[in-house]
Image (cartoon, rainbow, N blue to C red):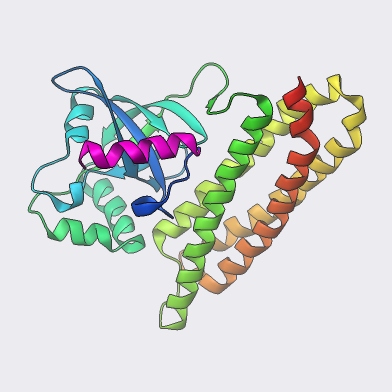
Amino acid sequence: MPIDFNQPVIEEFRANKGRVGGYFEGARLLLLTTTGARTGRPHTTPLGYLPDGGDRVLVIASAAGAPRHPAWFHNLLAHPQVTVESGAFTYEARAVVLEGEERDRAFARAMEAEPGWAEYQAKTTRVLPVIALHEIVPDGPPNINASSMGEAIKVVHDAFRRELALIRAEMNDAGGKAGTGGSALGAQLRVNCLTFCAGLHNHHTGEDLAMFPFLAERHPELAPALARLRDEHERIAELVEDLRRVVGDENADPDTARREVERLTEELEAHLTYEEEQLIPLLDAM
């Protein structure tokens, strides 16, 4: 896309920690910074992405079905190490172009989730590349796009809220399709749910093992609040496991999955709000 289109999106994305309106509103979006194949200069591009579980996400070099691959694709072929901004986090990643059956399965999931990918493919004779961006795990803590510990909690929580809202919308759509003859969740929607579940589990585990003990040592008066938060982590873990069991079935009923997502949403929002009320003022004062 032309620079004059990209730059306002990039600025809005960074200013709002991943939230944008306009063309990308309601989409999963990241900023990909590549190194120019000829110039060696950094180039940043907003891209839609697909969750893929674990430490990687997928992007597609569609260029809206143009006859040639986009410049960012040529850049990462020359320089596979890239920078990814997710809104909450900035991290280094290794770009790997998927090939053969792995590429075809991933692209089939993408088309099932969003028919626009099929429309782009139909416009061109080139095979649209699918690229996995593998996070390069840092030695230290993750780079959260926040200026304080309190803001970091809010930024991460809001990222979970946005992703869960997207999943809820996808679940509602899947439920509608079930009512018109569909009988199971799409493969990409199942991946989205399982990726979210894994991310939430990792976040709560990190709080239980690191942040909560850190706060308990410095603020003994927080003991009742921390005990409640730990109990809520256990309750949410049960709901996450229930959702995993449902969506892990390739023939999962969309309405059943949607009900599990609604249960998780209600409990998680109450938990996140309480945690923010109890911890952010203390963390911002440290």
Q: Quadrant of the N terminus?
A: top left
Image quarter of residue 282: top right
Percent x, y of residue 198: 56, 44
Asked if the stretch drawn in magenta spans residue 197, the answer is no
33 in relation to 69, above or below: above
Q: Quadrant of residue 280?
A: top right
Quadrant, the C terminus: top right
Q: Residue at x 85, y 19 (%)?
A: 218
Q: Is residue 69 above or below residue 85?
A: below
Judge whether residue 13 is colored magenta: yes
Q: Is residue 253 visible?
A: no
Residue 158 coordinates in the image, percent (x, y): 59, 44
Residue at the spot 64% in from the left edge and 24% down from the top edge: 148
Magenta residue span = 1-16
- In the depicted view, which residue is nearer to us: 281 or 71? 281
Q: Is residue 149 left or right of residue 74?
A: right
- Say which residue appears at 31% left-offset and 36% top-offset: 7
